[in-house]
Image: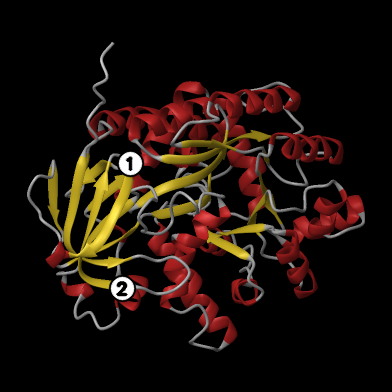
Amino acid sequence: MSTIKNKLRRLLIDKGLVITMGDRPEVLHHHSVGIEGDKIVFIKPSSEVNSEGWDEVYDARDMAVMPGFINCHTHAAMSLMRGFADDKPLKEWLEDYIWPSEAAFMNRENVALGTRLALLEMISAGTVMFADMYFFEDEVAKACHEAGMRVLLGEGLLDFKTPHFQRPEDGIAFTLDLASEYAHDPLVKVAFAPHAAYTVSPTLLKKIAELSGQHNLPVHIHLAETRQEVEDCYRAFGSHPVDHLFNVGLLNHRLITAHMVHVPAEYHARLREAGVRIAHNPSANLKLASGFAPVHEYLQEKIILGLGTDGPASNNNLALPIEWRHSSLITKMLTGQPETINAFDALYMATTGGAKVLGVDHITGSLQPGKAADIILIPLNKPHLLPVYNIYATLAYSMHPTDVDTVIINGKTVMRHRRILTLDTEKIITQVKKVEEKIAHYFHLNNRRNGKK
């Protein structure tokens, strides 16, 4: 029997401006990051590092070297529905456009394609992990393995038929099967993903709460997104959505709540004490006119908080730099306090904070020896990024999503010099254009039948 082990790839990121993130600001000038296999093995002054003998050396002079971004809430495959149902309120958007199009087009093949389109976009903007809530999530897992992307996936659970399952009970069983299959996978994590309190019955939510505790799986749900949702919850159950989730047993440290726009201040301490995690989605909330979450109050209360893009049909992009800019600038305007959500806070929500929301901060979200090599490189020698007096401010307020040059996930380079290495970009785009024609034709005919423009 051979005792020879596979040699780990050794990569050196040399002479960069290393931004470690974590719970306190730390910027290391002229430092190098050593990677063996999937792990960071050291971060040292470049003067102490021998650049000979490595499998590959990335020259990071004039570059920021930092943790990749984490998207805490999206519906990746909805990239195929980007832009066809814009400028509408949430209820009309869902009931008249999104749900009918999902029934007509979101089969297994198109979910696989839409997810890959979203992965191209996310990787190119520096994302290394995302939380997905959609259908045919086994296809999402396959796409993420192909791309080399991390994911917390959750099969969308609703009281009514979905494109994947006739009954929600089948979706629950499928979730448990996925959790078992990917229990030890380095890239794929699994969550329960009930859509919302207004689409999932209390009985089903109680069942999910019970199984979440038994199997130690997170629960990812939309919550308090619109005023109408809150009013409907009072009418149906006599309580605010936060109280409703408490009543069904879901208000605990395993809960990831997307949006949390309409949550009165009296609930904030309770959320922190319960360990609830919040995925803040500023662009989608603004575009759907749902309101704006009180993120400054959540931060003051020390609630675990990260950023999400929501789906590409409601945003319409998947770039975290746009999210932190919206979050920071609008919060400053609403509070009248320019120091609210400072530049470090903005980047923190997209990195370490996001990792905490998804329960992976022991793996990723900051650069430390022993953690996964989830790293991005951002060239700083561009007109809109110069001069650099405060690197956090430069990135928080001046960075474009397309500034990301290189993306490394779990030690594997998935994008280098803006070229994605793990997916066939041209093939995906060609396939997407064919689906676009079908969806456009379908809605053109339907709108003519219904007298809509």
Q: Name the residue under label 2.
A: 27
What is the C-alpha distance between the residues marked 2 and 1? 23 Å
Above or below: residue 259 compared with residue 162: below
Tag 1: Cα neighbours inside 10 Å, few (<14), some, or many (≥20)? many
Quadrant in the rendering for residue 213: top right
x and y percent of residue 24 in the render?
Answer: 44, 73
- 290 sits left or right of 240 in the view: left
Query: Can you see residue 152?
Result: yes
Tag 2: Cα neighbours inside 10 Å, few (<14), some, or many (≥20)? some
User: Residue 38's mark?
Assistant: 1
x and y percent of residue 83 in the render?
Answer: 45, 47
Q: Which amino acid does label 1 sit on?
A: Asp
The local secondary structure at tag 2 comes to: strand
Quadrant in the rendering for residue 431: top left
The local secondary structure at tag 1 comes to: loop
Residue closest to the far right: 238
Q: How many labels does the image show?
A: 2
Which residue is drawn at the image coordinates 31% and 53% (left, top)? Answer: 375
Q: Earlier in the sequence, mark 2 or mark 1?
A: 2
x and y percent of residue 113 in the render?
Answer: 40, 29
Q: Which amino acid does label 2 sit on?
A: Val
Residue closest to the far top: 1
Above or below: residue 312 compared with residue 174: below
- 421 sits left or right of 282 in the view: left
Which residue is drawn at the image coordinates 51% and 35% (left, top)? Answer: 443
